[in-house]
Image (tube, grey):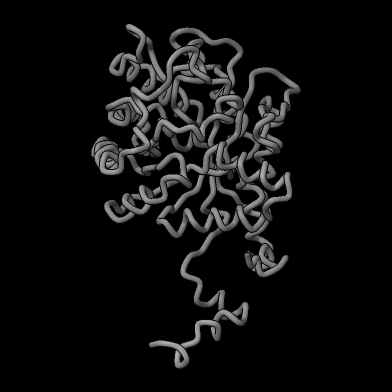
């Protein structure tokens, strides 16, 4: 069918018809909001490279989590800034560690909000790497024991889901086994199955105070040049017991999101990471882009690529815009070049 018999603008001409034929939908239920919990009291420190995002002590985490819940965002994912760090990341699996205490506070004060925890060592080690260092690199198998202990401590504190992000081989199996053996067989795992060694993580490393003291993470995170390897990584995590698989970062890897969507039928998450957030914020601050439109277009891009779940620092703004209606976010003009 071709012009003039077919005219695409007949449907595009009215908002009601655009809504009726929309191929991709976005709701607050698709979102997870990352939060940074800091040891101490009275702390609410804005992250310089991530406007609007804060390191916060537990009372402020609870207050913002209540706001998140009221906006209809169903879950948060927690990252911790402990009081002290050491070579083996002891606070990561301490009974009264920063994340464990934050979980307890959130489950008490905002019980309707799902609490997901990042399971990794980099925020808790004094060297900033994701596990135990041996001969200048992370010892994979020795680290598995600590990751399993960390996940179990989160489960005992009341976490609704754990999310290992370390990229150690075999960590999903190790976590699944210890959870099952300890009576947490129903606790789901959202695996950072496909996590690339990316330059887009820069602002996060300020937020989580997790910059490596030496070297980098390319010995355990994926090479950005690799596509087929993503299928192998995801398949391994699924076979080890992952309930949700994730791609991180988001925007530079939409082809990987689509590949995984085509290959697997598990729920699929994507992490709209700190660098992606900061670039939008910086460009909007300079007046170069319409922030609301670009944020919503980005979210729809993730969904269109095949993601079911989006972890994003924009979650509160997206929930507000969805509540108003996406067409209202486009009401400032046609956006023609």
Left or right relative to 251: residue 180: left
The foreground one among 270 and 159 is: 270
Q: What residue lies at 43% left-to-right and 39% top-to-bottom? A: 248
Residue that protrudes farthest toward the bottom in the picture: 5
Q: Residue at x 73, y 27 (%)?
A: 44
Residue farthest toward the front in the current orientation of the protein: 337
Q: Position of residue 191 (x, y in %)?
A: 38, 37
Image coords of residue 235 (percent x, y): 25, 41
* Residue drawn at x 30%, y 54% as measured from the top left: 265
Q: Is residue 158 visible?
A: yes
Relative height, residue 226 to residue 103 (above, below): below
Instruction: Tell me residue 113's x, y (percent).
Output: 58, 43
User: Quarter holding the N terminus?
Assistant: bottom left
Q: Is residue 115 above or below residue 329?
A: above
Q: Where on the picture, by quarter, is residue 47?
A: top right
| Image quadrant in which you'd find residue 185 | top left
Q: Quadrant of the C terminus?
A: bottom right
Examine the rendering and report whether any part of residue 182 can be seen: no
State the count of labels. 0
Compared across the picture, whether 327 is left or right of 298 comes to right
Above or below, 229 relative to 98: below
* The one of 58 and 85 positioned closer to us in this rendering: 85
Tell me the residue at 40%/42% (across/down): 246
Q: Position of residue 4 (x, y in %)?
A: 47, 91
Judge left or right: residue 194 versus residue 249.
left
The one of 236 and 254 positioned closer to us in this rendering: 254
């Amino acid at each position: 069918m071709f012009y003039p018999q077919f005219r695409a603008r007949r449907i595009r001409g009215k908002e009601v018809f655009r809504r009726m034929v929309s191929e991709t939908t976005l709701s607050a239920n698709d979102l997870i909001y990352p939060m940074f919990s800091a040891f101490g009291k009275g702390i609410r420190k804005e992250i310089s490279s991530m406007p609007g995002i804060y390191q916060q002590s537990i009372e402020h985490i609870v207050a913002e989590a209540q706001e998140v819940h009221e906006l209809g965002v169903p879950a948060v994912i927690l990252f911790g800034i402990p009081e002290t760090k050491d070579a083996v990341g002891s606070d990561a699996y301490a009974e009264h560690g920063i994340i464990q205490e934050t979980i307890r506070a959130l489950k008490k004060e905002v019980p309707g909000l799902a609490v997901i925890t990042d399971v990794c060592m980099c925020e808790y080690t004094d060297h900033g790497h994701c596990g135990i260092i041996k001969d200048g690199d992370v010892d994979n198998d020795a680290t598995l024991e600590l990751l399993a202990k960390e996940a179990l401590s989160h489960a005992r504190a009341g976490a609704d889901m754990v999310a290992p992000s370390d990229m150690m081989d075999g960590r999903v199996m190790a976590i699944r086994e210890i959870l099952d053996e300890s009576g947490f067989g129903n606790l789901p795992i959202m695996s950072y199955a496909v996590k690339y060694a990316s330059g887009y993580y820069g602002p996060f490393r300020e937020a989580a105070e997790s910059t490596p003291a030496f070297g980098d993470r390319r010995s355990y995170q994926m090479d950005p040049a690799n596509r087929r390897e993503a299928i192998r990584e995801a398949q391994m995590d699924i076979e080890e017991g992952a309930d949700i698989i994730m791609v991180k970062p988001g925007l530079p890897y939409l082809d990987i999101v689509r590949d995984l969507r085509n290959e697997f039928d598990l729920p699929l998450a994507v992490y709209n990471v700190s660098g992606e957030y900061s670039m939008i914020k910086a460009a909007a601050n300079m007046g170069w882009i319409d922030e609301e439109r670009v944020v919503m277009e980005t979210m729809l891009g993730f969904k269109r690529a095949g993601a079911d779940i989006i972890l994003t620092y924009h979650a509160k703004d997206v929930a507000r815009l969805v509540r108003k209606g996406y067409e209202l976010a486009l009401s400032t003009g046609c956006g023609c070049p």
